[in-house]
Amino acid sequence: MPVSDPMEETPVLAALEGGVLTLTLNRPTRLNAMSHPLIEAMNAQLKRAREDDAVRTILLTGTGRGFCAGADLAGPGPGDPTRSGERDVGAVMDRIFNPMIRAMRELPKPIVAAVNGVAAGGGANLALACDIVLAARSARFDQAFVRISLIPDLGGTWFLPHTVGDARARALAMLGSSVPAEEAERMGMVWQVVDDAALMDEATKIARKLATGPTLSYAAIKKAIDLAATNTLDQQLDFERDNQRELGRSADFKEGVAAFLAKRPAQFTGR
């Protein structure tokens, strides 16, 4: 019987401090490849983040020398078995992977990614699903799906054209290219590249700043930017009007204006 690695018995480490829920993918011997238990743990933590007012921001990173190597192809298989014995990859996407990406994008709180090494396949798109992405200088983003005759998933076919443009998205997906962190920054995949040793300090600094900010505003910004991909200008103007009306009634708006006039830091509460 195989012996489990005690380092990987908890596939996602979670720590809440100062409003920042740090989630660390914890399968270092597999470069944090996504097993079913890891995805289920992520989904549980995303549910917690939505329901717990003490969580104001998520910081996502990985243990060891990689962020995430994508789905664990060396595990029981990337798809659910059918009666014929074949794997239904689509079924497992529907059951656990896609709910995770939807939960990340719909979470009314910011998610910061600290990409600490290779982000390959679904791991690259997991990073792109976050709101603000920082990458270590040694990190790289690898759309490896075509090498095993699949297409980018976990939202990759949506995120890529919206971040790097149509031409680059097609080339990255079809060539399965590996993109170094600094090139990813130039393309618009990531917000900032920092030295490896400074990655977690910088990512934590941003996460803490967001955790003390106006969370109602962040939620509206996330939704507005997602809607902008399909809305007309008129629809977007209507969305902005409706949300400004609601935000203008909030305690945080009143506090923000008062702090601005008093030339002091605002104390936002998310209300």
Image: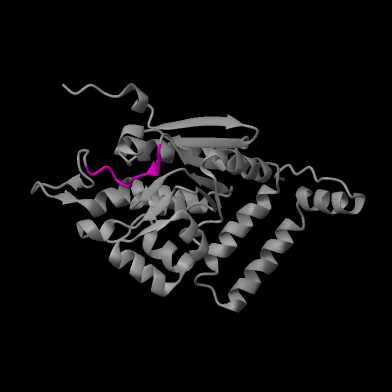
Q: Which of the pair 172/100 is nearer the observer?
A: 172
Q: Position of residue 46 (x, y in %)?
A: 48, 41
Looking at the image, which residue is at 39% across and 68% down? 169
Looking at the image, which residue is at 21% across and 56% down? 148
Quadrant in which the N terminus appears: top left
Quadrant in which the C terminus appears: top right
Q: Which of the pair 64/33 is nearer the observer?
A: 64
Q: Position of 244 compared to 166: left or right? A: right
Tally of marks: 0
| Magenta span dominant secondary structure | loop
The colouring scheme, among rainbow, by chain, secondary structure or one colour, is one colour
Looking at the image, which residue is at 54% across and 66% down? 227
In the image, residue 114 sits, relative to residue 144, either above or below, namely: above
Residue extending farthest to the right is 262
Q: Which of the pair 96/196 is nearer the observer?
A: 196
In the image, residue 53 sits, relative to residue 142, either above or below, namely: above
Q: Which residues are magenta?
A: 65-73
Q: Position of residue 10 (x, y in %)?
A: 38, 27
Q: Which of the pair 163/94 is nearer the observer?
A: 163
Q: Is residue 72 magenta?
A: yes
Q: Position of 215 compared to 164: left or right? A: right
Looking at the image, which residue is at 63% across and 57% down? 220
Q: Position of residue 168 (x, y in %)?
A: 40, 70
Q: Is residue 108 magenta?
A: no
| Residue 238 sits in quarter | bottom right
Q: Position of residue 55 (x, y in %)?
A: 60, 37
